Amino acid sequence: MSTIPEYEPRRLLKDAKERQERMVQELEALVSVESPSENKGAVDRASHLVAGWFEELGGKIRWYRQKQFGDLLEVRLRAMGSRPRQAAGARQKPILLLGHLDTVWPMGTLATMPFRKAKGKLFGPGVYDMKAGVVMALHALAMLREAEAMASPVVVLLNSEEEVGSPVSRAVTQEIALECSKVFVLEPAQGPQGAYKTARKGVGEYTIHVQGVAAHSGVDFEAGHSAVLELARLIEKISRFTDLKTGLTVNPGTICGGTRVNVIAAEAQVEVDVRIARVRDAARVERLFRGLRPTDRGCSVTVTGGMNRPPMERSRATVQLFRQAQEIARAMGFALEEASTGGGSDGNFTAALGIPTLDGMGAVGEGAHAAHESILLSELAKRTALLAAMIAG
Ligand SMILES: [Zn+2]
């Protein structure tokens, strides 16, 4: 018997480097199929391309058909290898690899932002967030299958509408996560160091609409009840909900209201982004927003919206996964850092169910949702090998 375990980190690193050229080619192919969230046909084209690759790998494909959005792609791979984790016969829980195939970039972006390689980076719409992560997962799994070193079954779930809040995939993600032992999220790593993410804030969106009473500001001033004035008071009030110590932030992002300068405004509205770091703050935030009342009794207030993604708290099980990754990275010759972020991902849903979730296991780069979106070529093989080792481990 070999003394080197089949999942030995340095061997995985070498295998990943040998695959790099193919990974880049496939990434180019995937980036070249534009896939904005709101274009079902486009996202379906991207997911069919990816499904074909996973099928070649021996994955079992299942589609969750959607009317409005792209179909959700589930791939199942059986465990294989000589390192069974449990006694034969015991049903082993799969590992869930979670990603999305939609991007924030509208059709036609490629004309001005084509896939290109320059200065050790790969550029293109969605290359970093997160088509590279999808290609990395594909090759991590391919390496493990070649080495017959997959101790657990794996489920890959790639959705089509993450960038618009995962309205249809959330339930599917949660259902699959509940049968899994852990979740690895293929979102980009954080910052230039490429940190893995062990905590994410929860995200909510509220709209506050004020109905006032219109009147001529010169002729009939006292008959009016200004929705704009009332909204201004409310914005002051909700801004005071912010509590930086506990990571709760409230941002009135957009406002509108009024019709003309000499009319007391009958209507005004604000859209508010809310972030929370602790699960237990969700109910409090909800109460605070629903409890808003007008100061001017001639106005009425309607609050819609709510919390969308729960926070991913830094749980002990997640930290344990991170430590494991850190150790493997060290064995591969690089340092891995840990980070938390205010941004949400689908990992928020699985973490909130109590499933150990490690996020940021995709590409290292910069410029998500920005024109300079790019990944670092030098990190591609390393991070793929690390992902593979984590799946093997
Ligand atoms: Zn993303």
Image (cartoon, rainbow, N blue to C red):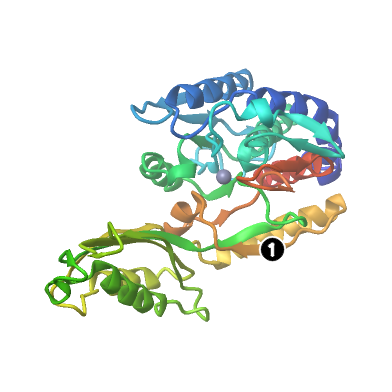
Please provide percent x and percent y for residue 11: 85, 39
Res. 81 visible in picture: no
Q: Quadrant of the N terminus?
A: top right
Res. 254 visible in picture: yes
What residue type is disc 1 on? Glu
Which picture quadrant has residue 13?
top right
Residue at image position (45%, 46%) is 177
Please provide percent x and percent y for residue 35: 54, 29
Left or right of 172 in this view: 188: right
Residue at image position (35%, 30%) is 68
Left or right of 374 in this view: 305: left
The local crowd at label 1, few if under 14, some if 14 to 19, many if 20 or more residues have their Cα within 10 Å, is: some
Left or right of 191 in this view: 175: left
Left or right of 331 in this view: 175: left
Q: Which quadrant of the picture is home to ligand 1?
A: top right
- For label 1, being within 8 Å of ligand 1 is answered no
**Is residue 21 or residue 323 the one in the foreground?**
21
Which picture quadrant has residue 179?
top left
In the rendered image, the residue lying farthest to the front is 219
Please provide percent x and percent y for residue 159: 48, 36
Return the residue at label 1: 338
Q: What element does badge 1 sit on?
A: strand
**Is residue 229 or residue 303 the one in the foreground?**
229
**Is residue 258 or residue 66 the one in the foreground?**
258
Please provide percent x and percent y for residue 196: 67, 56
Residue at image position (43%, 42%) is 176
Determine whether 25 is above or below 202 in the image: above
Determine whether 20 is above or below 355 in the image: above
